[in-house]
Amino acid sequence: MIYANIFYVVAAVLFILGLKKLSHPKTARGGNTLASVGMLIAIVATLIAYGGIDWKLIAIGMIIGSIIGALFAIKVQMTQMPQMVAIFNGFGGGASALVAAADLLSNIQNLINGSPILVSGIEIHPTFYSAVVAFSIFVGTLTFTGSFIAFGKLQGFISGQPIVFTGQKVLNALIAIALVGLAVMMVIDPVNMITFFIGVVVLSAIIGITLVLPIGGADMPVVISLLNSYSGVAAAATGFVLMNNGLIIAGSLVGASGIILTNIMCKGMNRSLANVIFGAVGLVQEGASGTQQQMNIKSYSTEEAAMILDAAEKIIIVPGYGLAVAQAQHAVREVADYLQSKGKKVLYGIHPVAGRMPGHMNVLLAEANIPYDQLLDLDQINSEFEDCDVSIILGANDVVNPAARHDKSSPIYGMPIIDVDKSKTVLINKRTMNPGFAGIANELFGFDNSIMVFGDAKQMLQQLLKDLKDL
């Protein structure tokens, strides 16, 4: 077992280095590789250290898992990546709960008889063992059901709008109290533990659903980060159930990094982390009018837009979910390359919650081989708009809405936004005038320096490039 712990330390070092490299798109692929190698080392060390393993079942499981993973990697489009991450979070939580449940069932007789619980040769106090099992099952099951509700909202077969009903918070509070009571009974009454165990599973599954249902589509980046953290916490708890240091380390790293990312997303959307945890995200603030003011929309053709860009010297592109849906990342790179060949400066402004999951937009643009030094985050890009000739908004909405600065009745009030309205000209591409995920009109569209070019982002950019070359 001592050799396994040494390999776990090696794996932990690779996990930490991998996480460090994931902080920048340029090194992210290398970081992913390092973390994958670390996980392989941890898995191999575990299989060798623990005896009595059916290698045939292990091989079958690895083959099936590899096939499923490869199909996901090949078939799932980048626009569907948030849904896939939500599913992976759910599977991670579900796996932790299943492992903890299986270990409990294998030790239930010892708990009833008051016999010592031996895990990996270590004697564990029954109270501690029962408590960590209950916690692992609670967090893992909650993550499983909550993640699949998030998947449904992202995929569209569950409404992306907040789903609320009278007494919802009271119901959640009652379920939470009941869960604590059932977990306590699991610890103090091992004879009836199976009954209490079933109760914990059922109520955990219900609260996972009721916590995510009231969350709107605009807040999915926060939810995905939080559920990712939950899956790590569940894995760490299961590590204590099995007394496996590798699982404790890996789960703790995922849980901690997920919470940090959640906090970043909360700041990017002006949300409270407490509101996210207790399921209050996405509810429209009281007093928000939701009314759309009359705006003077100026619709331009791509030919007119091309002439404006031809006269510009500095251009900033702000991509949003509309770009992702249209899969226009390659088209926007071609337009940018052409503009740069004419001696113009082109930058990209990336909001922390652009797209529908953390880092979604960075990955999309990296897929089109857009230089990393052109991708600037919110704090870096906002100072560039003072002397910007043209901002090109591609499918972004709430993250460029000036109402966030001054309209206290707006549900996005206080959210940090990209200051595109400070540009000399704001060129906005949208398919329709429909509002964004927050469900409110964008007053930017009616500004004197704003012009609209309607249409699919990819088709618009392709036509724009053609018009630029024809000038």
Image (tube, grey):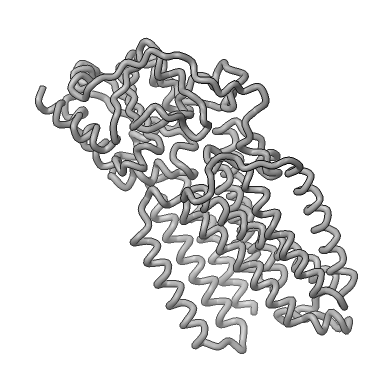
Q: Taking 145 as reference, is 373 left or right?
A: left
**Which image quadrant is residue 133 in?**
bottom right
Counting every numbered tag in the picture gives 0
Residue 433 image offset from top left, x and y in percent: 39, 27
Residue 21 seen from this side: no
**Which image quadrant is residue 326 in?**
top left
Residue 5 seen from this side: yes
Measured along the vertical axis of the image, is residue 332 above or below residue 187? above
Residue 204 image offset from top left, x and y in percent: 71, 59
Measured along the vertical axis of the image, is residue 99 above or below residue 429? below
Residue shown at the point (63%, 35%) measured from the top left: 283
Q: Quadrant of the N terminus?
A: bottom right
Q: Quadrant of the C terminus?
A: top left
Outermost residue, left side = 470
Residue 342 image offset from top left, x and y in percent: 16, 25
Residue 57 image offset from top left, x and y in percent: 52, 85
**Which image quadrant is residue 69 in?**
bottom left
Measured along the vertical axis of the image, is residue 332 above or below residue 401? below
Choose between 329 and 51: the one closer to the eye: 329
Residue shown at the point (62%, 58%) measured from the top left: 145
Choose between 121 and 417: the one closer to the eye: 417
Choose between 327 and 41: the one closer to the eye: 327
Q: Taking 258 as reference, is 471 left or right?
A: left
Outermost residue, top side = 448
